[in-house]
Amino acid sequence: MSWGWLARKRVLLVVLIGFIALLFLKSDWLGRMMYPIPFKDSIEQAAAEQKVDPYLIAAIIRVESNFRADKLSSKGAGGVMQLMPDTAEWIIGAAKFKTMSRDAVMSGVEENIRAGSWYVHSLHDQFKGNQAASVAAYNAGPGKVGQWLQEGRWDGTLARLDQVPYGETRHYVQRVNYYYKKYKSLYPEWSR
């Protein structure tokens, strides 16, 4: 074993320790690099138009599609906000989006974000501003979440998320909440 090899190994170790230290320091540039928000302008515009929190829209998009516009789920949900075709059609009618088509909502980023933001606003109204319940309803459907709340199976809080009967929905709400907090800390320019 040569001393040159040991010296290179030490340098590599120092570089690795420095990189790890960087990861644990509060550095906004690194955080923004690890948690980017593609389509930021579209999210900001749709959130303002629909009077919803842009951080919430970004968090839902991150969990639903990781900002992949071409994502199509095995159940047929599409776009960055993963809307089902029937839901997209219902949104277009209920929101009176006269110039929007189902195909545009399913394939266009701006249309998908606009329709999805309207739906989040609708759920927010339906669940009287309860963000946890609204997010759960985005995943499991408003009928199921309404039933859980009415029957007392879940109190609608993050603290009692363990009461949610669907493991997928519990995990979904936790992940959206995680990204919501992360985006809120990294992108303060959206704070109202």
Image: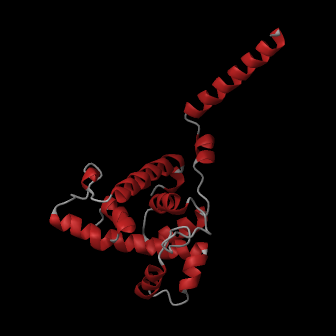
The residue most toward the bottom is: 98
Q: Nearer the viewer, residue 2 or 93?
A: 2
- Image quadrant assignment for residue 172: bottom left
Q: Quadrant of the C terminus?
A: bottom left
Residue 59, given in percent of the width and then of the height, sits at 48, 57
Is residue 126 something one can see in this rendering? no
State the scheme by which the image is colored: secondary structure
- The residue at the point 58 percent across, 41 percent down is 28
The residue most toward the front is: 1
Residue 87, given in percent of the width and then of the height, sits at 43, 80
Residue 56, given in percent of the width and then of the height, sits at 44, 60
Q: Quadrant of the N terminus?
A: top right
- Image quadrant assignment for residue 21: top right
Rendered position, 179 above or below 117: above
Rendered position, 35 above or below 133: above
Is residue 139 something one can see in this rendering? yes
Q: Tag count in the figure? A: 0
137 to the left or right of 61: left
- The residue at the point 47 percent across, 55 percent down is 191
Residue 58, given in percent of the width and then of the height, sits at 51, 60
- The residue at the point 30 percent across, 65 percent down is 129
Q: Nearer the viewer, residue 52 or 164?
A: 164
37 to the left or right of 132: right
